[in-house]
Amino acid sequence: MTLDIISTVLAFSAVTTLLLLISLTVRDLLSGRRPATDEDQADLVYIPPERAGRTALDRWFYELLEQSGSPLDRSTAALIPAAGAILGAAIPVVLLDNLLLGLGGTLLGALIPVAWWKLRAVRRQMAMRKHLPEALEFMADAVRAGLSLEKGMELVGKEARPPIRDEFRMCASQLAMGYPPYTVLQRASRRIPIPEFRIFATAVLVHRKSGGDLALLAQRLAQAARDRAEFRGHMKAVTAGSRLSVVGLTIGTLIACGVLAYTRPEYLQRFLADPSGPSLLGAAAVLEVFGLLWVWRILQVKY
């Protein structure tokens, strides 16, 4: 009886949360495509993650949304892991009547959206690193031609490549709506977490107050970004053999376990039936994960 009540509550919560999530997602996507009005400008005020988040986890999540370029509102995005956790718990409990799998599904359903945003943020940052030098050179040419900040960013938004093109285009549209340059560049620096762009954003604000050769600085930052990209490519080429060895050893271990379980299942059953077998297997898995994290940390070279 208790399991039936839990299943009913989870099924109702899953359906309700899913419908609410779909409606909020459609609202955010449609509002992002339609032209902004003066009322939108008065209502929409950008709040930085450090002020919007109450805890460190909230601030980390909001910064992840900025870096991934998500068009969703923060409240809508925060509802997605919650909906994933409810769905992950409801499916095993309702269909299989298994509370243990429901607990695992809760954790998995909450982590999958966050992992997807993290993967998208990493891929997006790699693409922006590749095209940022070209965008800064376009900006330097626009400044030399005497164009304003808004027109220069509009030019970059037309000539550069995505996703850096979309960010400059959004900056130009926000400046045209009357947003302060400080607010626009602050948000752009969070969505483009690259040191050269942050230096460029700071230089733009300083240039508006005290002047200076912004075109020369943008040109030098473009060259610095290009040098960093070349160094990063060199590091990947040098460490390619080591990374492939680690991946090969990890995959080889899993394949060997699978082949052993298929060809000699009685051997694996005897190993697991032994009191020390599961402990040894768990220790091997922990050491495997620790080794992967260690190698990954060694290969993270800051430049």
Image (spheres, helix red, strand yellow):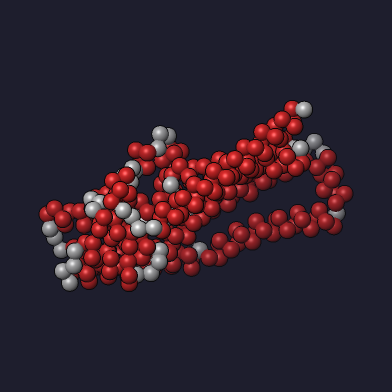
Foreground residue among 203 and 38: 38
Identify the residue at horizontal 43%, vertical 47% (top origin).
Answer: 73
In the rendered structure, the answer to whether residue 184 lies left or right of residue 233 reads left
- At a point 41% along the width and 40% down the height, the residue shown is 59
Asked where in the image residue 279 lies, by quadrant, the reply is top right
Near-viewer residue (233 or 155): 155
Q: Is the residue 95 above or below the residue 9 in the image?
A: below
Percent across and percent down for residue 236 are 48, 65
Q: Which of 173 and 292 is in front in this view?
A: 173
> From where the camera sits, is residue 177 visible?
yes
The quadrant of the picture occupied by the C terminus is: bottom left
User: In the rendering, at what x and y percent does residue 280 appear?
Assistant: 72, 41
Q: Is residue 195 visible?
A: no
Q: Where is residue 2 in the image (x, y as percent from the top left)?
A: 74, 27
Q: Which of 277 and 13 is in front in this view?
A: 13
Total numbered labels = 0
Residue depicted at x 52% and y 42%? 79
301 left or right of 266 in image = left
On the rendered image, what quadrant is the N terminus found in?
top right
For residue 173, which quarter of the picture? Answer: bottom left
